[in-house]
Image (spheres, rainbow, N blue to C red):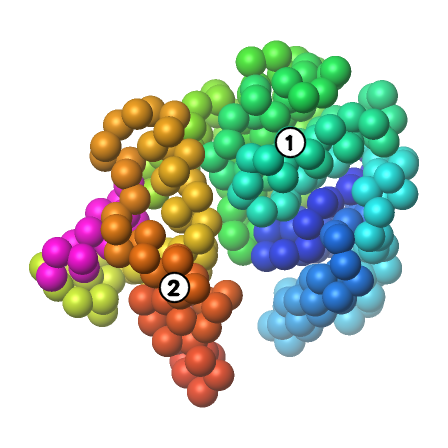
C-alpha cells in the first residue's frame, strides 16, 4: 500500500501529506485550486527546511519527501491508483458526504476510504458509499508531522481487516494509533472541546482575562498551551463546528457553544488563520505570539 491520496491541502491535509511522503509513501495531494496546492506545498517545504536546520533530516531527505508528492485539482485523476484515501477537507458534513460520493465513483474497489474528521460520524459518512466496511476514521493531531497520536475510529460497519490495515499504516508513520468507537467528538474532542468552551465562558463571564486564564492552566495544570491559545491554534471556526456536532449529537446543554465563540466566528476572528482571535496575530506580532504558544 504505497499510493496515498490526501484530499485537502490546508493545515491538516498538508501535514498528513508531509508525514506520508517523509515515510516513503507516494502521495497524491488533491485540492480544488492550484493556488491552494501551491500554498500547501510551500508550507510542507518550510516545515522541511525547519527540520533540516535542526538537523532532524538531511537536505537529501527533504528533496526525497517533496519528490514523493504530486498534486491534482481533480479527484478523479488523483485517486485513480490510490490504495488509501485520507479526506482532510473542511469540517462540514455536506462537503464530506459529497467527497465520499465522488470517492465511491472514482476509487478502485479495494481502496480504503478514511476521513480525518474530528467529530462527524464515520457511520454516516460510510452510508453514502457501497463499501461501508472499508470506511474508517483516521484522526491525526495538529501539527501532524510532530504529534504522535492517531485516533482510529470504527464506523458501525468498519471491518476488522480495514482497521488492522490502517493501524499498521499508522505505525509505519511512527504514530501511536488508538482505537475509538463512533460517537460525537470521539475521545480527543469530546474531552477537549468542553474544556476550551468553558475557558471561553470564563472569559465571557468576566472571571479573568485571556492571559490570566491561559497562565492558570499552563502553570497550574502543566498544560503546554493555554486553552484560549489552543483554540486560536485549532481555529475558532473549527471549535465551533465540533461543538455544534456534539451538541446536536448528545442533545446536552454542556456542549452548547459559548455566545462569545459564536460572535467571534461571525465577526471573522478565527485565530491564527485570520490574524486575530483571543490573541493578535497581525504581521508585526504573529511570530512573537506563535512562539509563545510553544514555550
x%, y% of residue 225?
A: 34, 60
- Disc 2 on helix, strand or loop? loop
Q: Tell me the mark number nearer the camera, choosing from 2 and 1.
A: 2
Q: Quadrant of the N terminus?
A: top right
Quarter of the rendering containing residue 126: top right
Gap between marks 2 and 1, in whole Å?
Answer: 28 Å
**Residue 13 visible in this rendered orientation of the protein:** yes
Image height of 135 relative to 257, above or below: above
Q: For the stretch drawn in magenta, what is the main secondary structure? A: helix
Which residue is disc 1 drawn over?
97
Tell me which segment is drawn in magenta. 194-206
Rendered residue at 23%/66% (across/down): 210
Which residue is disc 2 drawn over?
267
Q: Assess whether residue 10 is covered by the magenta stretch.
A: no
Q: Are marks 2 and 1 in contact (CB under 8 Å)?
A: no
Image height of 115 relative to 286, above or below: above
Amino acid at each position: 500500500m504505497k499510493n496515498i491520496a490526501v484530499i485537502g491541502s490546508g493545515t491538516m491535509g498538508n501535514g498528513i501529506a508531509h508525514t506520508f511522503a517523509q515515510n516513503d509513501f507516494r502521495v497524491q495531494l488533491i485540492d480544488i485550486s492550484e493556488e491552494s496546492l501551491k500554498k500547501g506545498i510551500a508550507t510542507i517545504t518550510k516545515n522541511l527546511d525547519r527540520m533540516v536546520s535542526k538537523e532532524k533530516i538531511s537536505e537529501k531527505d527533504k528533496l526525497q519527501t517533496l519528490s514523493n508528492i504530486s498534486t491534482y485539482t481533480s479527484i478523479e485523476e488523483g485517486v485513480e491508483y490510490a490504495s488509501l484515501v485520507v479526506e482532510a477537507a473542511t469540517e462540514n458534513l455536506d462537503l464530506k458526504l459529497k467527497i465520499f460520493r465522488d470517492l465511491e465513483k472514482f476509487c478502485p474497489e479495494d481502496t480504503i476510504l478514511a476521513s480525518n474528521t474530528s467529530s462527524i460520524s464515520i457511520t454516516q459518512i460510510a452510508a453514502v458509499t457501497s463499501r461501508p466496511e472499508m470506511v474508517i476514521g483516521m484522526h491525526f493531531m495538529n501539527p501532524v508531522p510532530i504529534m504522535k497520536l492517531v485516533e482510529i475510529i470504527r464506523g458501525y460497519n468498519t471491518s476488522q481487516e480495514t482497521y488492522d490495515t490502517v493501524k499498521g499504516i499508522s505505525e509505519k508513520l511512527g504514530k501511536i494509533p488508538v482505537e475509538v468507537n463512533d460517537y460525537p467528538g470521539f475521545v480527543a474532542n469530546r474531552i477537549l472541546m468542553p474544556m476550551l468552551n468553558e475557558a471561553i465562558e470564563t472569559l465571557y463571564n468576566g472571571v479573568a482575562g485571556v492571559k490570566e486564564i491561559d497562565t492558570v492552566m499552563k502553570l497550574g495544570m502543566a498544560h503546554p498551551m493555554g486553552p484560549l491559545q489552543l483554540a486560536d491554534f485549532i481555529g475558532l471556526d473549527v471549535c465551533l463546528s465540533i461543538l455544534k456536532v456534539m451538541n446536536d449529537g448528545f442533545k446536552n446543554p454542556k456542549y452548547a457553544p459559548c455566545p462569545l465563540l459564536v460572535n467571534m466566528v461571525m465577526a471573522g476572528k478565527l485565530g491564527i488563520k485570520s490574524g486575530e482571535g483571543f490573541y493578535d496575530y497581525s504581521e508585526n506580532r504573529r511570530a512573537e505570539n506563535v512562539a509563545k504558544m510553544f514555550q
